[in-house]
Image (spheres, grey):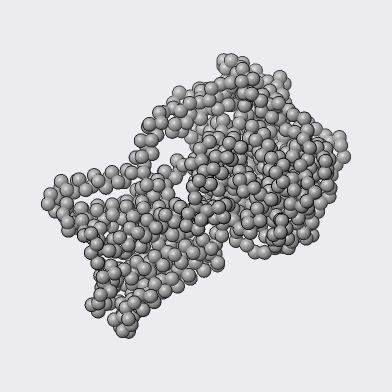
Amino acid sequence: MVASVTVVGNDGTDVAPGRLEVAQLSKTFGPARVLRSVRLSVAPGELHGLVGQNGCGKSTLVKILTGVYTPDPGGSIAVDGRRLRMPVHPSEQREAGVSVVHQHLGLVDDRTVWENVRLGRYQARGPFRRIDRRAEQEAVAQVLARLGRRIRVTELAGTLSAEDRATIAIARAVQDHRPGGGLIVFDESTRALGQEARGRFFGLVRSLIADGASVLLISHRLEEIVEATDRVTVLRDGEVVEAGLDTRSVDEAALTRLMLGRHLVTHGRVDSHARDDLAASVRSLSVGQVTGLDLDVRRGEIVGLTGLMGSGFEEVAEAVGGARRAESGSLTVGDRRISLGSRRASTEEFVRARVGYVPERRLGEGLAAEMSVAENLTLPRVRSRGHRFRTGRAWQAEETAAMITKLDIKPPDPSAPAGTLSGGNQQKVVLAKWLAGQPELLMLREPTQAVDVGARHDIIDAIRAVARAGCGVLIASIDAADLAVLCDRVLVFRDGTVTGELAGNLGQDDIIHATFGISPPQKDLLS
Amino acid sequence: MNAARQDHGDVADASAAGDVAPPPGPARPAVGLQVRHFASRYAVLGVWALLIVVFTIAKPGVFMTRSSFESIFNGQYALVFMTMALLCTIIVGEFVDLSVPAVFGFAATILPVLVTNHHWPVWAAAVVAVLGALACGFVNGLLVVVAGVNTIVVTLGMGTLITGIALWMSNLNTIVLPPSGFAKIAILPVGGLYVSFFYGAAVALAFAYVLGCTPLGRHMRFTGASREVSRLSGVRVNRIRFGSFVAASAFSGVGAVVTVAAIGSYNATTSDSYLLPVFASVFLGTAVIQPGRFNPIGTWIGIYFLTTGITGLEQLGLQTWVSDVFYGGVLVIAVTIATLLRRRTT
């Protein structure tokens, strides 16, 4: 895949000007130094990985590259041997051929595809300086054609699939690239993509590299990094612990050890905790394209819901969690029966029935960024455990401390605003918010999405523990690895119906095959 | 089901890795942080003290007198009630209720009109005035929460509408209450100040308690911070939002009754003049006690800070325009400070 990788040694000595050369880059926020003398070198035509735990400084580095943050004095960033001014100005960044596809893609949902792609580049023509829509649309269509994806340029971005949305963000990033140059940074851009879409994504990346571009791939999926990238740089606690490591010489375990500074030991298998009595049952659920779904979850059982994006499992999860209104159906938890078709302005009755819902978007649906960890964590119980005229401090302190210890939430500060925590720790707080209420049914959506291996470990442990305590758990996810590790059985959705139920000794491949409706062996994802 | 699940990795002793780098340490001492934290909470109080010193030196024997003290602390009851009303809706995320001064003016007009023009008993008229204000809040809540109309549009329209009705009711005149013991509910002297000062203090304290110490207050804060997070956590978001409009109108209505009792009359044309001071005080409050957060105690302090500044400047010989300059300037500065503080915490 590499066109030519003749740069830097691991000792950091410069050999030749790379496509991107970052040297001695530091960044301090108030009392916290989040980057310390970071160095990074990406060669022309190279696919370079950047990994590290949540909060290790990856996003800060990207924000310095894009001019959002000004680094501390003393550092430098050079592209093709040309040193950029600090802070990096967007026009200079664009001129240098550096573009970024951000984690959240940065799309405006109620604008069209072409408006999103051309944002910031509209060409005005004529005496009244009107935007030449036809020319803009043609330009976007050409970029999309280059990317090999057929998307109507007049479609609203908000109506598209996750894969198409990612493609639009990539189109925006690569439209100005001249063949033979440029650097594209993908910051967790594959997180919303399913297995199949990720395969196509890497096909696209390969074509960009074949054109001479360099790619910096930031991802929590270590298997992607090991299989797809040429070299990898590892960040830990704001410092580079390994720069430009050849990925042929490492495996996921070695990367994990570098990221965490500790070993990850694999255990054997664990028995199911499922009991005979029911924790919850869903009857005649009709939501979106799903009609008449019946589903039982036993106490201690972990049930996975999966499928291709848009296959209906997401809607089922939202309806069962109370996040959206179904056309019809009911959920029974213990002796409480909740109508899923009722119009409701809150999930109060779900909370009363001890149904916990961990949404897909942790900020915006799971946590209020400006409120503290303790306030977020205790919110669902503040009325039931508090007095009408007094929330009561003791139980909140006790509950928060217990959850911080149990899930190893960092920093262990109950008063820290939730928005200041790293993504993995935010996810732990969202989970803790419901675990602390000793739920009867826990509905989780993508519980380990964009979290590092350490956080994933803690989250999986916590899910198992709550199942062991008798809670029924539903996990809606496209992550086959999570489902294989956690679930007793997995329901596979396609076009709104359950097309398969997998049980027993689940493997990732079984789930992927069932999801795509293909027989093993499947072709290699990244080949 | 006896299916076995594949275990995931487990984390072993950290010391097993020989190349563990020490975590990055703090770049500055904690003392500096504490000083900054203290300064961000109490800087306005410091500036307030500084203002008092400056005015005392600039106008010896004029500013630091009992009459100045009384004019600063005795005359702000209307502002206190109206700022608490505005806080109700702002805290639950309804930016911004422009009808607060109009609702206040509407209730403050109903009372003297019923008593003077229609010979109602004053207490009955006071009840009707508060009910009139509540009706406005009810309609605001209905349109914003139930119908989903934009808050600014609804409250701007409602404010203009009821101001018009108040002007019609009063025929553009100042309506004076006949002399009665009703005034005592506002101007009864207690410890050298009017009792209405203590009403305001009590309301601010009670509101701060509700927000800081009760489930209702926690739900209000979360509703303001994120409606979706609150909804998915079992908070009755719409009920909270609707209730905040009704509570805001109740504050305005009660404040109007106290104000009319204190001054013995009301002119509906003056309602609009409260808009700027109310907003300036509420936003200034975000720079006091709880930096970056709308809070009743900070707002209450903000009111008297602003009044101190204006009183001092007027005593220095500046004309009445100074209040516009001061309120407007403080509003812009306070919003800027609040935005910066909020950015630092998220």
**A373 is higher (above) or lower (below) than B153:** above
Q: Position of residue A370 (x, y in %)?
A: 49, 46
Front-most of B256 and B102? B256
- Name the image quarter holding residue A273: top right
Q: Residue at x 49, y 50 (%)?
A: A392
Residue A183, picture quadrant: top right
Is A161 placed left or right of B313 in the picture?
Answer: right
**Residue A85, image x and y in percent?**
47, 29
User: What's the residue at 70%, 21% (across, down)?
Assistant: A250
Q: Let me know if residue A335 appears in the view.
A: yes
Identify whether A476 is placed above or below B68: above
Left or right of A479 in this view: A92: left
Whole-percent x, y for residue A21 in the image: 56, 23
- On the rendered structure, is B135 left or right of A148? left
* Quadrant of the frame with the N terminus of chain B: top right
Residue nearest the observer in this picture, A242 or B126: B126
Q: Is residue A217 above or below residue B114?
A: above
- Specify whether residue A83 is in view: no
- Residue shown at the point (61%, 51%) measured from the top left: A109
Residue drawn at x 52%, y 69% is B142
- Furthest toward the bottom, the residue is B118
Direction left: furthest residue: B61
Total marks in image: 0
- Residue A224 lies, in percent from the top left, at 71, 31
